Image: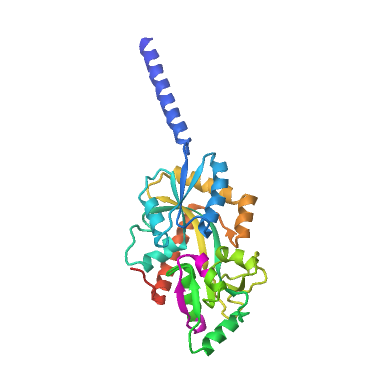
């Protein structure tokens, strides 16, 4: 009888221990999550991050702190997350630059974009846009190409920085059109737009979210978008393909990543929570208003996109000749 009682107590204790472990595993997240952003406050990445943090905090029932870490084309932020504890409490809002472009652009980066991260979900994507000042004589892409062909001096083209998607997409366009711009790289889109409006540069390429406010304010004129189809927020702006260069379809994606070694259950929890958050009307409207399109989906599909873009952009970077030491 005593042995039976002892045995029952042992079984009961074991059951309670397993139950406690199971409950503990279901408590994620039980503290604040840090969302690391490779961009300055009020920039395009920051807009997406704060819209996501608001919705994600409601979905996960936990606070989300946006941690802006600009610099080195996003490498600083990515490196912080790559070297953080893989427990789901440090998450990177990454984009095409850190995972597909920088590995070819820089001679050396402090992380491996494929081996050091687990992709969570692709949040959204947005095309780039070619635009000019509102008082520019260029009304169409054909006008810009003809001016570049006719001038003995190459037209200046501003981008948010050397090796950014905007820079490389402009290189792709120059190759497709047979013209040559003088590339003027800035440290971010804001300063470049200021100089464009002031007449110090002739043409600019940037992401739609970076330029949209100035387009709506009438300070700059949109010429063409780099996507395959026109975007709903700028329905009257033609694509580069429609403007005479068919097959042109390239842009920037944004997604969530955690360090390698993060438990699969946490990856799944974050994926499920992010999909719920980005499919809310509030988030969709925010991304739409910034010129983007909400994507979503599973971790594996996003991982395949990252891997294929890693190869594709490597080729584009090498063909452009762009390099940062």
Left or right relative to 18: residue 121: right
In this view, the residue in front, 164 or 242, is: 164
Quadrant occupied by the C terminus:
bottom left
The residues colored magenta run: 176-193
Residue 312 x %, y %? 44, 69
In this view, the residue in front, 265 or 156, is: 156
Quadrant occupied by the N terminus:
top left
Is 180 colored magenta in this rendering?
A: yes
Is 315 colored magenta in this rendering?
A: no
Rendered position, 197 above or below 67: below
Please give the name of the residue rendered at 49% of the width and 45% of the height, measured from the top-left corner. 65
Residue 169 visible to an observer of this rendering: no
Residue sitting at the far right: 236
Residue 97 x %, y %? 44, 63
Q: Residue 106: which quarter of the image? A: bottom left
Please give the name of the residue rendered at 53% of the width and 59% of the height, measured from the top-left corner. 44
């Amino acid at each position: 009888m005593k042995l039976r009682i002892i045995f029952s107590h042992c079984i009961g204790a074991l059951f309670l221990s397993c139950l406690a472990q199971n409950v503990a595993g279901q408590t994620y997240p039980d503290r604040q999550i840090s969302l690391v952003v490779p961009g300055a406050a009020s920039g395009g990445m920051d807009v997406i991050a704060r819209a996501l943090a608001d919705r994600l905090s409601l979905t996960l029932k936990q606070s989300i702190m946006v941690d802006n870490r600009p610099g080195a084309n996003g490498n600083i932020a990515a490196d912080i997350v790559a070297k953080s504890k893989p427990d789901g409490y440090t998450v990177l809002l990454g984009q095409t630059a850190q995972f597909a472009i920088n590995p070819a652009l820089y001679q050396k980066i402090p992380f491996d974009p494929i081996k050091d991260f687990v992709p969570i979900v692709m949040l959204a994507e947005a095309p780039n846009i070619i635009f000019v000042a509102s008082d520019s004589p260029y009304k169409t892409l054909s006008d810009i190409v003809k001016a570049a062909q006719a001038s003995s001096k190459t037209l200046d083209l501003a981008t948010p920085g050397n090796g950014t998607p905007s820079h490389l997409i402009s290189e792709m366009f120059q190759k497709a059109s047979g013209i040559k711009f003088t590339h003027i790289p800035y440290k971010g889109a804001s300063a470049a737009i200021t100089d464009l409006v002031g007449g110090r540069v002739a043409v600019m390429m940037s992401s739609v979210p970076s330029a949209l406010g100035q387009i709506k304010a009438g300070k700059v004129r949109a010429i063409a978008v780099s996507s395959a189809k026109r975007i709903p927020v700028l329905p009257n702006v033609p694509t580069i393909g429609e403007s005479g260069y068919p097959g042109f379809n390239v842009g920037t994606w944004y997604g969530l990543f955690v360090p390698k070694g993060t438990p699969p259950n946490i990856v799944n929890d974050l994926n499920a929570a992010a999909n719920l958050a980005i499919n809310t009307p509030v988030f969709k409207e925010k991304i739409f208003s910034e010129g983007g399109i909400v994507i979503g989906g599973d971790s594996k599909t996003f991982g395949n996109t990252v891997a294929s873009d890693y190869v594709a952009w490597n080729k584009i970077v090498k063909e452009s000749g762009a390099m940062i030491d």
